[in-house]
């Protein structure tokens, strides 16, 4: 992890880059960094970073934080982050970040309610609906679009989304 430079008003953008931050221990480490540094924006430059397992921990540590995350395996090239990103207001920082692959990124203000909304919608979904929204198999991550338009990834037990036998 690296933290951006603070400007005169104390704003900080935390850029998290690496692998495996959606697993419990690294996710807790990211949440601890967010709690300690109190950034005004967080850019999650890691694969499947829109995972509710990671986002829930961050939301508890610093509710209302603007987030940039992905719903896919982020290519090694990562994000385009302008050199002057720290000079922008927090929500404008989100708009300035893009994936070098050209794939869309998720931009939203994180709350525990947003995470709960995604998890509740996924819990009540049918097997067919879940199967249609599987993004990753191991662990099984299902894409769920929430009320603000963002897509979050909810981990579901593999048995809830059995594989269809090939013909």
Image (cartoon, grey):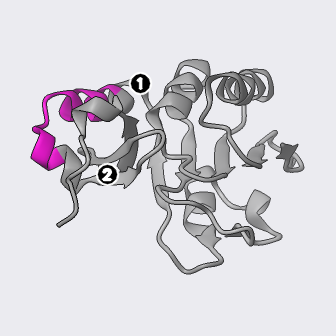
Where residue 72 is drawn, which disc sits there?
Answer: none
Secondary structure character of the magenta stretch overall: helix
Who's the residue at 62% across and 31% down the image?
A: 23
Is residue 58 found left or right of 16 in the rendered image? left
Who's the residue at 17% across and 67% down the image?
A: 167
**Which structural element holds mark 1?**
helix
In the rendered image, the vertical position of residue 89 relative to residue 120, given as above or below? below
Q: CA distance from mark 1 to mark 2?
A: 23 Å
| Location of residue 141 in the rendering, given as x and y in whole percent from the top left corner | 40, 43
Of 7 and 118, the residue lying toward us: 118
| Location of residue 85 in the rendering, given as x and y in whole percent from the top left corner | 74, 63
Does residue 62 show up magenta in the picture?
Answer: no
Disc 1 versus disc 2: nearer the observer:
2
In the rendered image, the vertical position of residue 90 relative to residue 54, given as above or below? below
Of 134 and 114, the residue lying toward us: 134
Is residue 25 found left or right of 159 in the rendered image? right
Where residue 134 is drawn, which disc sits there?
Answer: 2
Please give the range of residues in magenta: 116-129
Q: Residues within 10 Å of mark 1 (few under 14, many from 20)?
A: some
In the rendered image, the vertical position of residue 11 relative to residue 93, given as above or below? above
**Which structural element holds mark 2?**
strand
Write down the residue under mark 1. Answer: 112
Looking at the figure, which quarter contains the N terminus? top right
| Location of residue 95 in the rendering, given as x and y in whole percent from the top left corner | 55, 66
């Amino acid at each position: 992890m690296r933290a951006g430079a603070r400007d005169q008003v104390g704003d900080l953008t935390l850029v998290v880059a690496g692998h495996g931050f959606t697993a419990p221990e690294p996710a807790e480490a990211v949440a601890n960094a967010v709690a300690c540094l109190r950034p005004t924006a967080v850019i999650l430059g890691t694969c499947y970073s829109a995972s509710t397992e990671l986002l829930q921990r961050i939301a508890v540590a610093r509710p209302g934080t603007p987030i940039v995350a992905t719903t896919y395996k982020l290519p090694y090239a990562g994000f385009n982050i302008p050199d002057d990103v720290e000079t922008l207001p927090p929500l404008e920082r989100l708009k300035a970040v893009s994936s070098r692959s050209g794939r869309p990124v998720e931009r939203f203000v994180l709350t525990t309610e947003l995470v709960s909304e995604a998890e509740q919608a996924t819990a009540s979904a049918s097997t067919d609906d879940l199967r249609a929204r599987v993004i990753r198999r191991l662990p099984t991550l299902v894409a769920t679009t929430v009320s603000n338009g963002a897509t979050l990834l909810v981990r579901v037990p593999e048995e809830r989304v059995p594989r269809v036998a090939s013909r």
